[in-house]
Image: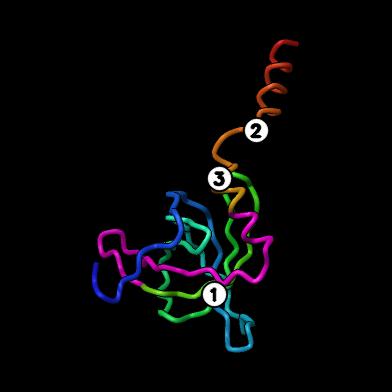
Amino acid sequence: MGSDMKPRKDRRFKQWNKTKIMLLGKNRNTNGHPPVEAFTYDLSIGGARLHTSDPIEVGALLRLEIDLARTGDILRVEGLVKWRRKDEDANVFEMGVEFQHTSMVTVLSLMKNLHDGRRPAPAEKSEQAAVSRS
């Protein structure tokens, strides 16, 4: 690990989620820029790795709409691009985005997706068993 590298604070989950990226200007508006299609990967409470065909600069402020695959929730969160690199083989850009949580709702939605969404709730199992017996 290089001297300028910091260890990750949060556990990462390998999870692909469809994502829309909106670039934000200084006034936190999109200035009419259309959303960019992307996918998240290595999702955590603190941030995500994004894959997109559009090069987005380090330091850019983004508004993300992440379609959380495990729970079906749409997470809306702002993030700051911390690093970027190009995967020449796949012709895609990878970037690390640190979430700028402004609401406890986004944190709770992420926690539900990452932790609770991995296994079905006990009530769902018993309901499915009752339906299959009828």
Q: Position of residue 131 (x, y in %)?
A: 73, 17
Asked where in the image residue 12 lies, by quadrant, the reply is: bottom left
Asked where in the image residue 120 lies, by quadrant, the reply is: top right
How far is mark 1 from mark 2, CA to CA?
A: 34 Å
Comes first in the chain, label 1 or label 3: 1
Mark toward the viewer: 1 or 3: 3
> Residue at left 61%, top 80%?
30
Q: Residues within 10 Å of mark 2 (few under 14, many from 20)?
A: few
Which stretch did the figure color magenta? Answer: 84-110
Question: Residue beneath label 3, please?
Answer: 115
Residue type at mark 3: give it.
His
Comes first in the chain, label 2 or label 3: 3
Question: Residue beneath label 2, please?
Answer: 121
Residue type at mark 2: give it.
Ala
Q: Position of residue 42 (x, y in %)?
A: 42, 55
- Which image quadrant: the C terminus? top right
Q: Position of residue 3 (x, y in %)?
A: 25, 75
Q: Nearer the viewer, residue 26 or 87?
A: 26
Give the total of numbered labels.
Answer: 3
Question: Residue beneath label 1, please?
Answer: 62
Q: Is residue 2 magenta?
A: no
